[in-house]
Image: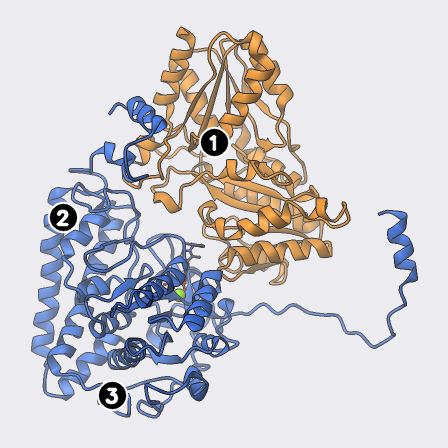
Amino acid sequence: MTTMNMIQAINSAHVTLMEKDPKVVVFGEDVGYFGGVFRATEGLQQKFGVTRCFDAPIAEAGIVAAAIGMGVYGMRPLIEIQFADYIYPAMDQLTSEAARIRYRSGGEFLAPITVRTPYGGGIFGGQTHSQSPEALFAHVVGLKVVIPSTPYDAKGLLIASVEDDDPVIFLEPKRLYTGPFEGHSTDGVKTWAGHPAGEVPDGHYIVPLGKANVVREGSAMTVLCYGTMVHVCLAAARETGIDCEVVDLRSITPLDVDTILTSVNKTGRCLIVHEATLTAGFGAELAAIVQQECFYNLEAPIDRVTGWDTPYPHVFEWEYFPGPARVGAAMKKMMEA
Amino acid sequence: MSDRGKTAKAAKAEPAKRNSIPLKLRVPEPPARPGQAADFSHIKLPAAGVTRRPDVASQPAEMHDLAYGLVRVLNEKGEAVGPWAPKIDADLMRRGLRIMMMTRAYDDRMYKAQRQGKTSFYMKSTGEEAVPTAAGLALDDTDMLFPAYRQQALLFARNWPMLDMMNQIYSNAHDRLKGRQLPVMYSSKEAGFFTISGNLATQFSQAVGWAMASAIMGDTRICATWIGDGSTAEGDFHHACTFAAVYKAPVILNIVNNQWAISSFQGIAGGTEAPFAARGVGYGLPALRVDGNDFLAVYAATQWAIERARSNQGATLIEHFTYRMEGHSTSDDPTRYRAADERQKWPGGDPIERLKQHLIKLGEWDETRHTAQQEEMEKLVKDTQRQAEAIGTLQAGQKPSPKTMFEDIYGGEPDWRMRKQRQQFGI
Ligand SMILES: Cc1ncc(C[n+]2csc(CCOP(=O)(O)OP(=O)(O)O)c2C)c(N)n1
Ligand SMILES: [Mg+2]
């Protein structure tokens, strides 16, 4: 075990994967010599050589397409898109290609690629360094969508993603890279040191895809969340004193429906929290499943707290960000219902 | 795999035996990294004046050599020589010098403001000021601009108020973009300056569309756009070239080759295989490669491209060969990926120094005036900064009204969900 922040844990996952399997190859913009703009691939080129970790041209469609080609050859590309906001040029390669290759070839060809990309706000990045596009990918059958919330999960989920034969979009909550951010904009920087999930095994382990984590047990209501919002929801539960059961989904495709339903059937209430915009967000899918499956156990309408339906505005970072105040208010309202 | 697959495989003939050697992947590397001495020996700068200037009416196929050459006007002695030397008066050159100095002073000050926590982000254009400045002065003020994020000098060339730009950097109450955009992502319809996108390269093909529209409508205005060396790898660059060539769109396609894309040297974008300008050859676009640190060369090349565009001869691709003297932005530290002495060893000189030297040589400028202008620019920037900060910075003072964050998403009346969300937000 070593104390790691999320970047170090992701870096450690790369090392573990690359040591174990010579077919794991890493590339993306600035990931080679420099080690990535967030330093996630630092030292990999020096350790494994330039043909296993290298800089790519600034062409996201090209990066994903090349990864698919390598995957078809039989390699396991682990690529980085510098910011999730810049993944859109690769949309065709992801939705029409990576997601469909297994199906359209009758299961003969695979695209076993993992696309890592930092997402979410909280760093004053404005609208092109803050987006949360998970719902776009969840809507594409054939893609898996994984979102860690701690260093421990980040490493275990990343290893599981790369070892999975299907294409995985691995969204990294960049605001959590250096510490468990609870959503108070005025909070000083808190590090992962001292957090139980900041203790990360040095070697190989996996956190399976499709297995949610009940990070706080409770009886009053179920809170479904992932990524940065896990810490925001925990803070809101603490601050309101409401006995919430906080469920970190960890992957939205595949989705751990059993854990969700067991929890909601127990608590009778369900609040869904994500940073992405509301309309047609992943919360809508969760709400539909919960109301269909738990309807007769619900004691209050399902509610969602999300980013507003606007682009992420630079100066209004904290007005946009669904912080503990907004989440807490929704929790209280739900208890009154 | 199915049995059918196996049968098909068995029926295949064995490949002919040959002495196969293992294949190898080449990954380009820059000549020097931190801890090594910078090495620019691969850069061969032709002497000023030697590159020919084809007639504006020449066909693209007759000028492939220019994509591999380098248009240079200012020589080491500060003289303007050769066929490209533009016939411009000293006033215009002094104006160019002033704008470049203004840009540099502005960049220095805004960079420091970010370091002092007054805003979130900043990007300098240090060393590349001649590229937007000369183009901005060669174009008409009514021509349309589709810039990337390092052409702030275009706004100065159009006499756009510095205070307005600073208000954007600070996302304060007077920011015309209502605090929505990351600093340096300016926009001004009045200045003919298209809203800068954080997503690289998108403007390049949009500019071609604007130019096509101008041609469809029988307008007389043309359009210019800029893209970084690294960003030429994006599909948008190639879409722009295809559309511009096919429709002979009245557009000037500028590639700013400043040698770096964050930490990736220009070889990662393919620049060591062939000059960026040479990409024009494959599309049938006239392509020029120009010394981007030579104000007169940039001016002359732009003028040449303007003449072509205005006379329905279509688009021109121009590679400006320059150097990013500073880090990519306030978010990076270039000493982590490039040799420490690169800036000192860069063979292309400093655009401000080179134009200054030329003006002095002509007897149109002197050191005293230069120092005075330097002080004037610093004072101008400082005074403007004081005014901007009196309105507000990202951290303090007057901000745009939060309710504006729900505006401009669509035109017209807000729909049900927007009304509901505004209500929840408390407005
Ligand atoms: C589509 C897209 N991909 C990646 C990025 C991240 N990014 C911002 S600037 C940059 C480097 C651009 O280099 P270049 O085009 O050479 O322009 P320069 O910064 O040198 O002016 C990168 C990769 C982005 N903004 N947009
Ligand atoms: Mg560049």
Which hue is chain A drawn in? orange
| Residue type at numbered disc 2 | Ala
Residue B337 lies, in percent from the top left, at: 45, 62
Q: Are marks 2 and 3 in contact (CB under 8 Å)?
A: no
Label 1 vs label 2, nearer the camera:
1
The answer, for residue A108, to whether it is visible in the render is yes
* Disc 1 target residue: A280
Q: Which colour style is shown?
A: by chain
In the picture, measured across the screen, residue B24 lies left or right of residue B20, that is left
Residue B264 lies, in percent from the top left, at: 47, 63
Q: Are marks 3 and 1 on the same chain?
A: no
- Tag 1: Cα neighbours inside 10 Å, few (<14), some, or many (≥20)? few
- Tag 2: Cα neighbours inside 10 Å, few (<14), some, or many (≥20)? many
Quadrant of res A28: bottom right
Secondary structure category for the residue under label 2? helix
| Residue type at numbered disc 3 | Ala
| Residue type at numbered disc 1 | Ala
* Disc 2 target residue: B388
Which hue is chain B drawn in? blue
Label 3 vs label 1, nearer the camera:
1
Residue B119 lies, in percent from the top left, at: 25, 46
